[in-house]
Amino acid sequence: MARTAGHPVRVLGVSNEDAVAQADVVVVTVPFVALIDTLRTVKPKFRSGQVLVNVSVPLETAIGGRATRTVGVWPGSAGELAASVVPNTVSVVTAFNNVSAELLKDPSKPVDCDVLVCSDDENAKKIVLDLVKGIAGARGFDAGRLENSRTIEQITALLVGLNIRYKVKSAGLRVTGISHVS
């Protein structure tokens, strides 16, 4: 049993279908090329009121291109695409797209990065913003409606390019000039 912010957390491994059936908040972190198939596979297991956090970004690598560019997605973004696949009783949130997996690997180290959170459901955004508070060093920002995922996903490609250019694995984003309240 692990501990987060003083609270015990139960960690166990289950199939994707069982995880979706059991969770209140589902986080999908698959490469964009696998997003639709993954969501279609687990779609029957979603329940009304669940929150789906989409972290997938439509990087050009999905079609053999560069990780520093995105591909156009018919609904506008991977977040909006996810919303079009899951039942409409599930609230979709875009978050963590701009936080390097390298930064999240070791929960004992603070994450020097801000998390932009988009959704059309204010309560779902609040739930995810509260999750961000549990990550030392991270700050969550309400970045508006789900359609703003389009911009956030573009920033991810830019950060990948910065990682490559500066030979690092953890380029992130900090929002300045806002008194942080989340």
Image: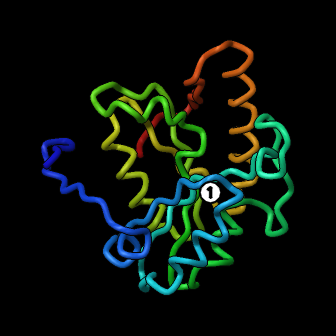
Above/below status of 126 relative to 180: below
Give amino acid for label 1.
Gly
Quarter of the rendering containing residue 68: top right
The spot of residue 51 in percent (x, y) is: 45, 70
- Residue found at x 69% / y 67%: 80
Which of 171/44 is in front?
A: 44
Describe the colour scheme in one phrase: rainbow
The spot of residue 74 in percent (x, y) is: 84, 67
- Residue at the limit of the structure toward the top, as seen here: 166
In the rendered structure, the answer to whether residue 30 lies left or right of residue 36 reads: left
In the rendered structure, the answer to whether residue 155 lies left or right of residue 9 reads: right
Q: Which residue corresponds to mark 1?
A: 144
- Residue found at x 21% / y 44%: 4
In the rendered structure, the answer to whether residue 14 lies left or right of residue 155 reads: left
Which of 128/54 is in front?
A: 54
Quarter of the rendering containing residue 132: top left
- Residue found at x 75% / y 32%: 158
In the rendered structure, the answer to whether residue 173 lies left or right of residue 75 reads: left
- Residue found at x 76% / y 46%: 59
Where disc 1 sits, the SS reads loop
The spot of residue 56 in percent (x, y) is: 62, 53
**Label 1 neighbour load within 10 Å: few <14, some 14-19, many 20+:** some
Above/below status of 146 relative to 56: below
Above/below status of 58 relative to 35: above
Above/below status of 98 relative to 23: above
The spot of residue 7 in percent (x, y) is: 14, 49
